[in-house]
Image (tube, coloured by chain):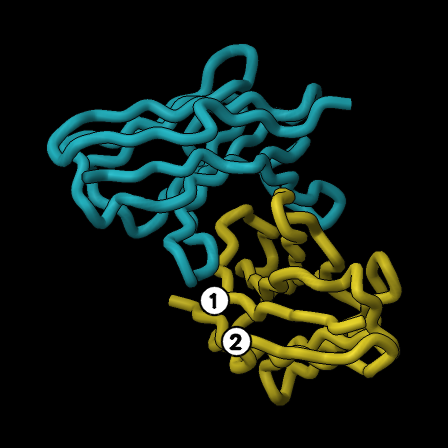
Amino acid sequence: DAGVTQSPTHLIKTRGQHVTLRCSPISGHKSVSWYQQVLGQGPQFIFQYYEKEERGRGNFPDRFSARQFPNYSSELNVNALLLGDSALYLCASSTRDRGPDSPLHFGNGTRLTVT
Amino acid sequence: AQSVSQHNHHVILSEAASLELGCNYSYGGTVNLFWYVQYPGQHLQLLLKYFSGDPLVKGIKGFEAEFIKSKFSFNLRKPSVQWSDTAEYFCAVSLGGTGRRALTFGSGTRLQVQP
């Protein structure tokens, strides 16, 4: 079975540009979450979507936005990129938006470098 | 806001040695606790989780963790490590009661097992 797929795998952008990262959840999973992992740190929660509705938002500026589509795939958008946005962006999916019987399954991530 | 501390940043063990990785969290309410592992070149995978019930939780690959509420701890243990356990280990917490997906991760512990 295909796991969580993210595209692109690597991306280089310049300060001030905009970026869109994409995520396809595991088939049957209706919840998608996004995390940012800066080198040397653990992942930090950005957003959670379930059935196309935002269910949670972490402590990130409004430059970060996301959406979920009818097929449950998701996009993370970051505007006005800063050097500090350089990180590994992880997508995770689950069958439901909560509960012990619905663990998160992570993708391999998109490595974003801002120069 | 809750936080998670992993005091061991880098641990080096010989095969067959016993392992204990520390994890402490700061939140006075009900929590859900997780340990994730990231093998070299692979995505984050769930090792084990605690939501309620028996505070001694058994996970995959012979790992276990004990939730000690009075100490705000959820340490990971394995009696005898193998070279294939070389990986980065992350402890994570989410607020209990809802089991919501907003995980707060620790900064990780890099485990190196020498043959």
Reading the image, the residue beneath label 2 is B9
State which chain is coloured yellow.
Answer: B
- Exactly how many numbered labels are in the figure? 2
Q: Name the residue: 78% across, 79% down.
A: B14
Report x, y in % for residue A106: 60, 40
- The hue of chain A in the figure is cyan
Q: Quadrant of residue A113?
A: top left
Q: Residues within 10 Å of mark 2 (few under 14, many from 20)?
A: some
* Observer-nearest of B77 and A8: A8
Report x, y in % for residue B59: 82, 60
Dot 1: chain letter = B
* B87 w.r.t. B45: above or below: below
Reading the image, the residue beneath label 1 is B107
Q: Name the residue: 74% across, 57% down.
A: B47
Report x, y in % for residue A85: 26, 44
Q: Name the residue: 16% across, 27% down.
A: A17
Report, in whole angstroms, how far the alpha carbon at label 2 lies from the one at label 1: 8 Å
Which badge, 2 or 1, is on the more N-terminal residue? 2
* Residue B107 visible in this rendered orientation of the protein: yes
* A98 w.r.t. B91: above or below: above
| Contact, mark 2 vs mark 1 (Cβ under 8 Å) | yes
